[in-house]
Image (cartoon, rainbow, N blue to C red):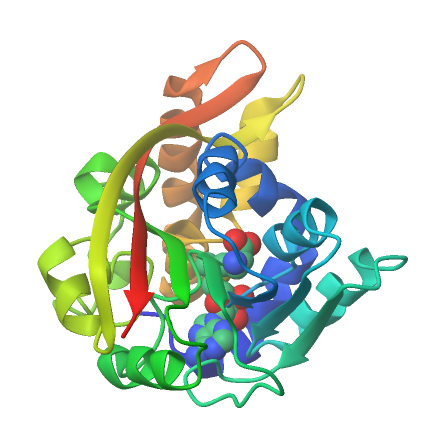
Amino acid sequence: MTDIGEWQGGVGRSWADEHARTDRSFSRMTPHLLAAIHEEPGRCVVDIGCGAGELSLALAQARPDAMVTGVDVSADLVAAASARAAGLDNVRFAVADASTWQPEQAPDLYVSRHGVMFFPEPPAAFAHLSAIAAPGARIVFSCFRNPRENRWASGIAALLPESAASASADPVAPGPFAFADPDHVRTCLRGWRDVTFTPVDFDYIAGAGPDAVTEALAFFGRIGPAARAIRVMPEAERPAFLERLANLLESHRSGDVVSFPAAVWLVRATAE
Ligand SMILES: C[S@@+](CC[C@H](N)C(=O)[O-])C[C@H]1O[C@@H](n2cnc3c(N)ncnc32)[C@H](O)[C@@H]1O
């Protein structure tokens, strides 16, 4: 579970510091998401949970006639995104909770790369997004499928000591896998019709370079389930965990790249 308070605090700060590596981790998936987005018209585009803004910036560059607004609850991430947007005059960013945010103009296209699974009350959030949208507005977002198909997560889960095992047994609690089940996503998309799911499999890049395992260890030490586990486990358990993690990363190294099988849905829908 990752709640809004965590994104507004240290988790958001880590993502801002590590944005080059998080963008890289998704680099084999983002072109699929952008291709799906480019099938949709839209001049008033909103990037939900925009993070450090890679998707917003790509859309602003691809659509000079559109205005792209990235919305995120983390001030640190919005600062990182704004810094990257220097020189582009058709993109802006707002620190706001997208589930209640009021735009100046009705959006006709929502996009999101993994930014919609953290709403505490997803049906209310999606109903709001539909209510403030232009008639027939579209949404295109990516979200992880189940952890078994995402070895970067299930591999780490298998290494955790009991002290750091996930406390939440709720598979749809806000977090990276909250939208793994299409039936659940359909029930969350209140106010939306024509919902479709397209699976995309890709290599999630954890580390690269001459010492790719050390580089991946640095990344996983700050972002995702290993970082969370390291934060909560007793200090005495950390060296053994880090050794197991390094062995896992080594077993997924091919040459100078450490990567894991990963799986997402590309979800599309139309506002009612
Ligand atoms: C997994 S990160 C993805 C960030 C970015 N889209 C990317 O692909 O790099 C999830 C993002 O959603 C943001 N977020 C979480 N809940 C939110 C909410 N209710 N409204 C807006 N942003 C939210 C977080 O701050 C975080 O930046």
Which of the 4 image quarters holds residue 77?
A: bottom right
Q: Can residue 188 be seen in this view?
A: yes
Horizontal arrangement in the rendering, residue 109 relative to residue 69 (left or right): left
| Quadrant into which the C terminus falls | bottom left
Total marks placed: 0
Quarter of the image where one finds residue 8: bottom right
Q: Look at the image and tell me whether residue 11 can be seen.
A: no
Q: Nearer the viewer, residue 194 or 118?
A: 194
Above or below, comparing residue 199 to residue 186 in the picture: above
The image shows residue 103 at horizontal and vertical percentages of 57, 85
Q: On the image, which quarter does residue 67 sit in?
A: bottom right
* In front of the other: 131 or 228: 131
Q: Which residue occupies the extreme left position in the image?
A: 183
Relative height, residue 243 to residue 252 (above, below): below
- For the point 57% across and 69% down, the residue is 12
* Residue at screen point 48% across, 37% down: 35
User: Which percent across, then down, holds residue 36?
Assistant: 43, 42
Answer left or right for 199 relative to 21.
Answer: left
Image quarter of the N terminus: bottom left
Q: Residue furthest right?
A: 87
Q: In this view, does 3 lie above or below 229?
A: below
Residue beneath the point at 31% across and 33% down: 200
Q: How far from the left and from the top, in percent, is residue 163?
A: 25, 62
Q: Which residue is situated farthest in the top direction here?
A: 255
- Nearest the camera: 142 or 247? 142
